[in-house]
Image: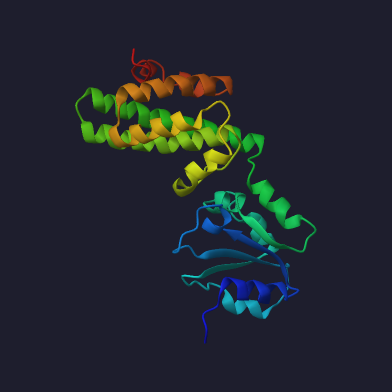
């Protein structure tokens, strides 16, 4: 039997009336990102309560094709919240039998609502401050490895924070440069931002961390999250380098 290819499966699924949507995610949904090793990651969305022989492909995974077969209700819930949210936020619609309904579901995943974004930003800000504080304290006390590891953690939390402030799910590391090249974060110059997080991740440079924190503090206070930082009290002085 010949391996099931992406093109063959799409043709098969499109002919099945139980299928209301096909959604391609992963490298093939990001222009310029696929390589010879990239498979096709495909969501197969079935009408609620429908039956189809396609369920025999549930869990199908080969170097060519990775299938996720879900009901419409399950598709609405996917990544809300969860690791899949970014993947679906940037996914491509291959088939939409709901007059744009599949596309609207994806659009909803790509945009955090105001309360969700505000709550997430406050949490990520506190996590960022925690790791930053630990890094600069370890640097001060001569614990170089700990300082670098905490600095790397702080970068992860910072990126979560900055995307939450823009009401977007953070991209996976693989797609960070791709995302920012096409959809920059408001108020941040993409090139310098990527350069500084790269250097901090590699070196744990305390001076650079404090310079970046100064910019972050302005942004989060303007966004209404000053109380999160103020709760750190005198420890802010170490983060600021005073």
Q: Which residue lies at the image location 36% right of the left edge and 32% below the top edge?
A: 131
Residue 18 in which image quadrant: bottom right
Residue 130 in sight from this viewpoint: yes
Q: Residue furthest bottom?
A: 1
Tally of numbered tags:
0
Point out the residue furthest to the right here.
99
* Residue 126 visible: no
Say which residue appears at 61% left-offset and 49% top-offset: 89
- In the rendered image, which quarter is residue 186 located in? top right
Q: In this view, does 61 lie above or below 185?
A: below
Quadrant location of the C terminus in the rendered image: top left
Is 219 rendered above or below residue 203? above
Say left or right for 74 vs 140.
right
**Residue furthest top in the image:** 242
Residue 129 location (% of width, % of height): 41, 28
Query: In the image, residue 119 lies at what x, y percent?
Result: 57, 34
Q: Is residue 241 left or right of residue 220?
A: left
Residue 190 on image: x %, y %: 50, 32
**At 19% from the left edge and 26% from the top edge, which residue is drawn?**
142
Of residues 141 and 57, which is closer to you in this image? 57
* Residue 10 placement, left or right of 218: right
Tell me the quarter of the picture where residue 111 sits: top right
**x 49%, y 47%: residue:** 175
């Amino acid at each position: 039997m010949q391996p099931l290819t992406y093109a063959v499966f799409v043709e098969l699924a499109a002919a099945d009336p139980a299928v209301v949507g096909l959604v391609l995610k992963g490298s093939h949904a990001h222009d310029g990102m696929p390589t010879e090793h990239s498979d096709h990651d495909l969501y197969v969305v079935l009408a609620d309560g429908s039956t189809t022989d396609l369920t025999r492909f549930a869990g199908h995974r080969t170097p060519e094709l990775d299938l996720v077969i879900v009901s419409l209700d399950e598709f609405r819930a996917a990544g809300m919240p969860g690791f899949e949210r970014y993947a679906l936020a940037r996914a491509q619609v291959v088939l939409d039998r709901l007059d744009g309904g599949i596309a609207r579901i994806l659009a909803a995943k790509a945009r955090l609502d105001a309360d969700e974004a505000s709550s997430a930003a406050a949490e990520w800000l506190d996590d960022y401050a925690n790791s930053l504080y630990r890094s600069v304290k370890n640097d001060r006390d001569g614990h170089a490895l700990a300082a670098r590891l905490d600095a790397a953690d702080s970068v992860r939390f910072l990126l979560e924070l900055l995307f939450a402030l823009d009401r977007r799910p953070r991209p996976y590391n693989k797609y960070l440069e791709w995302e920012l090249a096409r959809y920059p974060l408001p108020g941040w110059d993409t090139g310098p931002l990527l350069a500084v997080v790269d250097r901090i991740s590699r070196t744990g440079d305390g001076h650079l961390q404090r310079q970046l924190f100064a910019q972050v503090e302005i942004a989060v206070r303007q966004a209404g999250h000053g109380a999160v930082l103020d709760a750190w009290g005198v420890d802010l002085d170490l983060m600021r380098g005073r």
